[in-house]
Image (cartoon, helix red, strand yellow):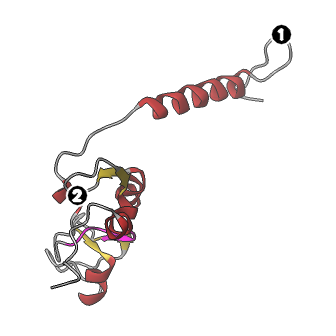
Amino acid sequence: MEGCSEDENGSNNSITQKRQRTSTESEEKKKRTGTLLDLDATDCPVCFDSLTIPIFQCENGHIACSTCCGKLSQKCATCSLPTLSRNRALERILELLTVPCPNAGCSQTVPYAETSTHVNHCAYTHRPCPFS
């Protein structure tokens, strides 16, 4: 086979190298972390609500949440081009993102997509007095 070589044991070097590289990349992915300092960056630029999956984009890369995209008849609010494609890279980032609970006193971090569920059940959520 072209581009493939076998070592003295008869195993394919390119496959072995790929497995080693994949294993190393997996270990590096586990170690890589980051901090998002401005949670407003996760807001839809049209309605300013938190972005939810699916996220759509126009040909110029402007994004909108699926709710806004539907309300705008699949046209970009910024440039009026069609919003036909999903921004899967940003969707993946949101899937991996963990955020701190917004309630004062709560120290939990939760997956981005589960923030509203957590806030609804969080012991630190401000609730109106049932006696007033």
- Residue count near mark 1 (Cα–Cα under 10 Å), binned few <14, some 14–19, many ≥20: few
Left or right of 9? Residue 129 is: left
Q: Is residue 97 above or below residue 121?
A: above
Q: Is residue 92 above or below residue 44?
A: above
Separation (CA) of disc 1 from disc 2: 59 Å
At label 1, which amino acid type do we have?
A: Glu
- Residue at position x 71%, y 28% from top? 15
Question: Where residue 28 appears, x then y in whole percent?
Answer: 47, 28
Tell me which corner region of the image, top left, top right, bottom left or bottom right, holds residue 92: bottom left
The residue to which callout 2 is attached is 102
The residue to which callout 1 is attached is 8
- Residue count near mark 2 (Cα–Cα under 10 Å), binned few <14, some 14–19, many ≥20: some
Viewer-side residue, 128 vs 29: 128
Quarter containing the C terminus: bottom left
Element on which disc 1 rests? loop
Mark before the other along the chain sequence, 1 or 2? 1
Q: Are marks 1 and 2 in contact (CB under 8 Å)?
A: no
- Residue at position x 20%, y 84% from top? 131
37 inside magenta stretch: no
Tell me which corner region of the image, top left, top right, bottom left or bottom right, holds residue 127: bottom left
Give, as a single range, the part of the protein colored magenta.
Answer: 49-56
Q: Is residue 91 above or below residue 98?
A: below
